Image: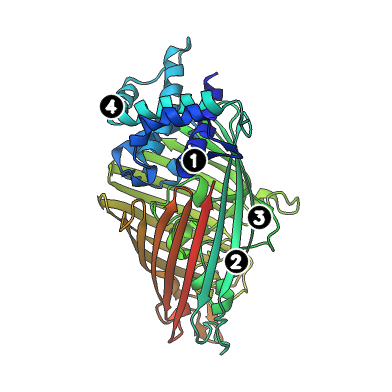
Amino acid sequence: MKKQSQLNVVWLLALSTIFSLTGRAVGNEVPAALLVENADPLAKINPVSELAGIQPTDWAFQSLKSLMDRYGVVAPGYLDSALRGNRAMSRYEFAASLAASMNRISELTTAETANRAHQEDLETLKRLQAEFDRELEVLQPRLHNLETSIGYRIQPFSTTTELEGEVLFAVSGVGSGETADNSGDATDSNLTFSNRARLTFNTSFTGKDRLRIRLQAGNIPGIDDATGTDMARLAFQSDSDNQFELSILEYRFPIGEQAIVYLEAEGGDLDDFFTDTLNPFFSGSGRGSISRFAQRNPIYRQGGGAGVGVVYNFSESVSLSLGYLADEADNPEVGFGEAEYGAIAQLTLEPSDSFKVGFTYIHSYNSLDTGTGSRRANDPFNDESDAIIADSFGLQSTLEINDGLTVSGWVGFIHATAMDLPNNPAADIFNWAITLAFVDVGIENSVAGIAIGQPPKVTSSDFEVAGNTYEDEGTALHLEAFYRFPVNDNVDITPGVLVITNPEHDRNNTTYIGTIRTTFRF
């Protein structure tokens, strides 16, 4: 069966990488026949780490991603996550996903049903096949030979489920000085060594759908507690005393050729599942920015938990995302109607292969705390309101200047109203950021990132505390730099530094945070 063949490709490709790096099979010597066979054609092939990468903004990347979405293709292993998460790929990684797409579309064009591939999609596929003809030519025989030589030794994890793993370790520290919470206490400037582990199970029952289950454990402390401000929060913070917990339970399936429906039972986020945040090199917590703020526009962080979403692709260049998530939706006392919630609508346009822009609207209830801004921005009514309605507007864009530089940025505006206080006071909250990603700096597949922005700030308010308007008086700046470089195909190291000037928008000092993140993927 073609589906079984595609699943075998996942394991054979992984084993191929192990052979090329170590020269040994898992617990066994590499068969002599395979070594002899590899000695001729494959010895001339450059390692994957030395190959020119396919960037998320390349026409090939976007074209293949569109085809996979339209025809419900599940790529081998982590390659599907790479395409969904918009990270750079090697040409051989890309060819593996292309081969899976070719098999799927071939099924549709030969089956005796009304479901046929569009002619323009076939033309796109022909162009991709011609562009990656050499990689496909080398990849297919290699996988076939590996399956013949060692297939009898290795049993797949499951015929329907793929396992992905990620483990990261972080050494982090805070510069000496006072905390930003007006307590007069000194920051906790001791170095810490901590970790986070994720196991993700992706299951497909039809070849078009996907059930995702993620378990997560970690002991990474809150840097925001050490500094007294959420502006210093790291992207990968997680503390469950290293006990595994269910962090994601999600099922997605297509409707027709243009719509994908998401059902979230646990751990749903408006940004992760329904929308493209248009910040491709910063969005991941394991391989993106070191800070929470630089990952995406903070307005996306309103709402989470259980709910439903849909993405409708009008064309390759126009898509609409709609979603609704509620916290404690399983609680009979609140349900969907009374729980904290966030609802999103985003129109994403792609005028060219190198430019994208997104227009976002979010309506939320008691979900204003984004964990990125000042205390006033997270709670503009000083904990006196239990019914805060917020309307948020965002503009995001990303532009690939050239193969080595991508510039992204956003502005976000929130209008919050306390519905249970006299006269329904309102507050306006604003944030912005610009990010720059320099690709292949010194090392192939490396990324040097710079982020500059203003964390969420209360710019105006009708609410008063002790006769004073509850606004942020000063302006903080977020300055971040990191450099992610690969040790091999499965290990990345990312040193980074974060500087917050005038933290909490009202402190005349500066907060410094440094970290070294090491990420292992399998």
Q: Which numbered disc, 2 or 3, marks the residue closer to the eye?
A: 2
Which numbered disc, 4 or 2, marks the residue that appears first in the sequence? 4
Q: Which residue type carries mark 4?
A: Ala
The crowding category of the residue bearing disc 4, from other C-alpha atoms within 10 Å (few below 14, some 14 to 19, many at least 20), is few
Q: How did the renderer colour the structure?
A: rainbow
Q: Which residue in the protein does label 4 denote?
A: 130
Q: Which residue in the protein does label 2 denote?
A: 194
Q: Are marks 2 and 3 in contact (CB under 8 Å)?
A: no
Can I make out residue 505 in this image?
A: no
Q: Residue furthest top?
A: 112
Compute the Cα span from label 2 to label 3: 34 Å
Name the residue located 48 percent from the left edge and 36 percent from the top edge: 16
Percent x, y of residue 161: 61, 34
Residue 340 placement, left or right of 174: right
Q: Which residue type carries mark 1?
A: Gly
Q: Which residue in the protein does label 3 denote?
A: 339
Disc ID at residue 23: 1
Which numbered disc, 1 or 3, marks the residue that appears first in the sequence? 1
Disc ID at residue 430: none
Compute the Cα span from label 3 to label 4: 52 Å
Q: Which residue type carries mark 2?
A: Ser
The crowding category of the residue bearing disc 1, from other C-alpha atoms within 10 Å (few below 14, some 14 to 19, many at least 20), is few
